[in-house]
Amino acid sequence: MSQENEATNLGSPRACSIADALEVVGERWSLLVLRELSFGVHRFKDIQINTGAPRETLALRLRKLEEAGVIERRRYCERPPRDEYLLTDVGQDLIPVLSALRRWGERHVTPVLAARGDDAPRRVPPRAGA
């Protein structure tokens, strides 16, 4: 479908790959989980600390991302049982999207929040080369 036809599709919900993608990764905690995994943080407790996600919420998001094939869970300790989370190839394909979203936020959102004095809780140390 051309962009012109898409702009005039009135009267019914539009089929949209963006909406489909947002069903999988378009929630705050899911995106922050993906950020952490892309930074090399793989263990539940570390992801929880770095995102600030409530434990139950984080567990649900990890399960949803795993079911969607975006991440995989791998056992790294049998006693006690402990798992780590890794990006699949599907998840790796999201890294440029996350980078673009980060650049957009740095350019258009963070400066506004900083001007209002509302940026401290959202700060994450920059990653080299990001």
Image (cartoon, rainbow, N blue to C red):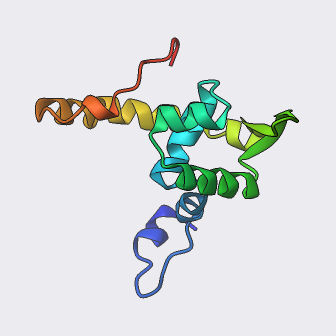
- Along the line of sight, which residue is nearer the eye, 107 or 46? 46
Judge whether residue 97 can be spotted in this image: no
Name the spot of residue 105 as percent of width and height, x first.
34, 35
- Along the line of sight, which residue is nearer the eye, 64 or 100? 64
Q: Residue at x 63, y 33 (%)?
A: 37
- Given the current orientation, which residue lies at the most extreme front position? 79
Residue 31 drawn above or below residue 38: below
Q: How many marks?
A: 0
- Along the line of sight, which residue is nearer the eye, 90 or 121? 121
Q: Residue at x 60, y 35 (%)?
A: 45
- Given the current orientation, which residue lies at the most extreme right position? 78
Q: Please tell me in which quadrant of the rendered image residue 36 appears.
A: top right
- Given the current orientation, which residue lies at the most extreme bottom position? 11
- Given the current orientation, which residue lies at the most extreme top position? 128
Q: Residue at x 58, y 68 (%)?
A: 1
**Relative to 94, 76 lies left or right:** right
Residue 103 drawn above or below residue 91: above
Name the spot of residue 94 as percent of width and height, x first.
62, 40
Judge whether residue 121 can be spotted in this image: yes
- Along the line of sight, which residue is nearer the eye, 119 or 50? 50
Residue 8 drawn above or below residue 86: below
Name the spot of residue 32 as percent of width and height, x first.
50, 41
Name the spot of residue 77 as percent of width and height, x first.
84, 31
